[in-house]
Image: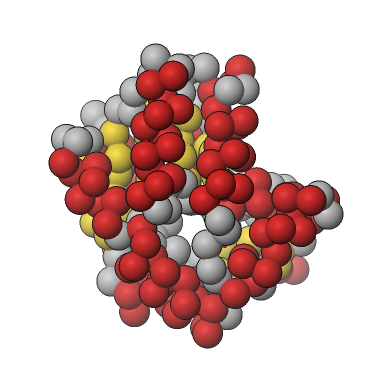
Amino acid sequence: MRLILLGPPGAGKGTQAKLLTDKLGVPQVSTGDILRQALADGTEMGRKAKSFMEQGALVPDEVVIGIIEERLRKSDCARGYILDGFPRTLPQAEALSRALRSLSAALDTVLSMEVPEEDLIRRLAGRRVCRDCGYMFHVDTHPPGERGLCDKCGGALYQRDDDTEVTIRHRLQVYREQTQPLIAYYDNMGLLKRIDGRGTIEEISQRVCQALGQG
Ligand code: AMP
């Protein structure tokens, strides 16, 4: 199963991707996670990406395309993967199509997760992430248990630097301008399925599974 989760920041791509990895037995490939790890490790790629990420801007195409080409060649991707946060621009989508052709592979589905903008801002501003396992919480709708630690692994939670209101608004504008056109791109290829991304994690997960015929 080669799947893209497409949608604005805060649509729930990461949360649903994590649930799907267990169900489908294929890895989540998140360029955002790979970049944040590179930043934490202080690698050259991390240093290049830092200022773009802090401002909520996109990291240049050639950097993320390089990351994805390398990641998709790894053996755990042989049976498929869930792309979360890639592609985000038309050149990235075209590079992915080329990379897939060269591996004689094809995408199965592109799920567009659709959520109104007011909900996205509320979700992102209240989001807290586990530093150890990446599991996500929300201060109002999905709070962590006692002591404010991760329910899954006990790790410490943090707020992403780019989850502040000014940066969130910029990320949403970038999404509208650069990523939203991919909906039509994949619709024209006959791969697009739209999902109502409102509601609880479980409700959205049910819709995702139904759309993928895994219901
Ligand atoms: P995310 O975790 O997907 O919200 O990504 C966090 C940040 O990483 C974004 O705001 C961008 O700065 C950068 N990033 C992640 N994926 C991409 C991508 N496909 N293209 C460009 N920048 C990206």
Quadrant of the image for the N terminus?
top left
Residue 66 seen in the figure: yes
Q: Position of residue 129 (x, y in %)?
A: 64, 61
In terms of depth relative to the viewer, which is nearer, 50 or 152? Answer: 50
Residue at left 25%, top 51%? 183
Q: Residue furthest bottom?
A: 166
Residue positioned 79% across, 51% down in the render: 44
Q: Along the horizontal axis of the image, is 150 left or right of 163? A: right
For the residue pair 128 and 202, the one nearer the viewer reads as 128
Residue 149 lies, in percent from the top left, at 72, 62
Which image quarter has ligand 1?
bottom right
**Can residue 123 be seen by looking at this rendering?**
no
Q: Classify residue 215 by image quadrant.
A: top left
Q: Please identify the quarter of the rendering in which residue 126 is found.
A: bottom right
Residue for point 42% across, 53% down: 88
Place of residue 10 in the rendered image (x, y in percent of width and height, measured from the top left): 44, 64
* Residue 67, position as x, y percentages in the image: 61, 40
Front-most of residues 93 and 201? 93
Seen as rendered, the residue at the extreme right is 42
Residue at image location 57% in from the left, 58% down from the top: 59
104 sits left or right of 70 in the view: left
